[in-house]
Image (cartoon, grey):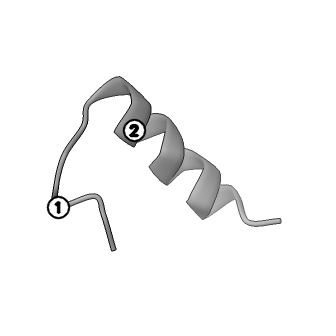
Amino acid sequence: MTEHFTIMLDLRNRKPHPSTKL
């Protein structure tokens, strides 16, 4: 649906950051 969301999930999976959570 949205690439932006996919990138966010990928980043979270790679490096869990509380700031990544919207």
Q: In the displayed structure, does residue 11 sit left or right of residue 16?
A: right
Which residue type carries mark 2?
Leu
Contact flag, marks 2 and 1 (Cβ < 8 Å): no
Badge 2: residue crowd in 10 Å (few <14, some 14–19, many ≥20): few
Identify the residue at image location x=73%, y=66%: 2
Q: Nearer the viewer, residue 15 or 4?
A: 15
Farthest residue toward the bottom? 22
On the image, numbered disc 1 is attached to which residue?
A: 19
Which residue type carries mark 1?
Ser
Q: Secondary structure at mark 1?
A: loop
How many numbered badges does the structure rendering display?
2
Q: In the displayed structure, does residue 3 sit left or right of residue 1?
A: left
In x, y percent, where is residue 3? 69, 57
**Which quadrant of the figure contains the C terminus?**
bottom left
**Which label is found at residue 11?**
2
In x, y percent, where is residue 7? 54, 47
* Looking at the image, residue 3 lies above or below residue 13: below
* C-alpha distance separating marks 2 and 1: 11 Å
Identify the residue at image location x=19%, y=46%: 17
* Looking at the image, residue 20 lies above or below residue 22: above
Q: Quadrant of residue 20?
A: bottom left
Q: Secondary structure at mark 2?
A: helix
Farthest residue toward the left? 18
Q: Which of the marked residues, 2 or 1, is nearer the chain's N terminus?
A: 2
Farthest residue toward the top? 14
**Which label is found at residue 2?**
none
Q: In the displayed structure, does residue 17 sit left or right of residue 2?
A: left
Identify the residue at image location x=42%, y=31%: 13
* Looking at the image, residue 2 lies above or below residue 12: below
Q: Quadrant of residue 1?
A: bottom right
Identify the residue at image location x=26%, y=30%: 15
